[in-house]
Image (cartoon, rainbow, N blue to C red):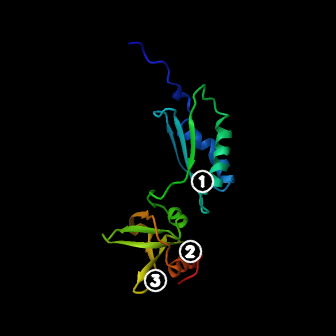
Amino acid sequence: MAPDPKLPSADLPSQKQVIELLDGEFARAGYEIDDVVVNAATRPPRITIVADSDKGLDLDAVAMLSRLASGLLDTVDTGDTPYVLEVTSPGVDRPLTTEKHFRRARGRKAELSLADGSSLTARLAGTDGDQVNVVVAQGKDFAVRQIPLREITKAVVQVEFSPPNRRELELAEQTGKGARA
């Protein structure tokens, strides 16, 4: 059997090269690169850029970032290697692990596992230093609770099919803007 010719996907930029090329321009546009995946095993190969910001990532932002990334990646010599470029948001299934993840998910419902073995479902209400503010049901009303970030062992945003309670959202917004409830 003859040896395999050089794989065209070997001409793709590395994850590090993509980040170095795009990071400054994404930051100037108000977005942050969370991850880059260069997958040469798919046909055609795929470069996926996961971006986020405090203001979220809507379809207009995805289109703008895709054009920006495409233009900059066109300056990289990939030989004749075709690839698919995808710019996407982190998605709701991304675990919340840092202060910025919790801050960016303000207003969303999340399932939290705590270091003491307990768990709770709460609406995220932003952060206050190393504390995560959450809105929890308390009888027939809601209350704001602060949980140290170090006490949260796992947190995942929950998909909601019903509109949230208005009072719950009000508390999340007030607390997220620095007011105390």
First along the sequence among labels 1 and 3: 1
User: Is 141 on the left-hand or right-hand side of 73?
Assistant: left
**Which label number is shown at residue 142?**
3
Where is residue 74 shown, x and y percent of the image?
66, 35
Residue 73's disc is none
Please report the residue visible at 44 percent of the width from the left and 72 percent of the height from the top.
Answer: 148
Locate residue 85 relative to residue 141 in the image: left or right: right
Q: Where is residue 180 in the image (x, y as percent from the top left)?
A: 55, 83
Q: Check the image and name the residue furthest to the front.
A: 162
Q: Which residue is drawn at 52% across and 82% down?
A: 167
Q: Where is residue 153 in the image (x, y as percent from the top left)?
A: 37, 64
In-front residue for pair 130/121:
121
Asked whether, in this view, residue 101 is left or right of residue 154, the answer is: right
> Circle 1 — which element?
strand
Q: Residue at x 45, y 64 (%)?
A: 159
Residue type at numbered disc 3: Phe
Question: In terms of secondary structure, where does tag 3 sit?
Answer: strand
Circle 2 packing at 10 Å, graded few (<14), some (14-19), many (20+), is: many
- The answer to whether the residues at label 3 and label 2 have Cβ atoms under 8 Å apart is no
Does label 1 or label 2 sit earlier along the sequence? 1
**To which residue does mark 2 refer?**
176
Q: Quadrant of the N terminus?
A: top left
The residue singled out by tag 1 in the image is 32
Give the residue type at disc 2.
Gly
Residue 120, position as x, y percentages in the image: 37, 72
* Mark 1 residue type: Glu
**Which of pointers 3 and 2 lies earlier in the amino acid sequence?**
3
Q: Residues within 10 Å of mark 1 (few under 14, many from 20)?
A: some
Q: Distance between the residues labelled 3 and 2?
A: 15 Å
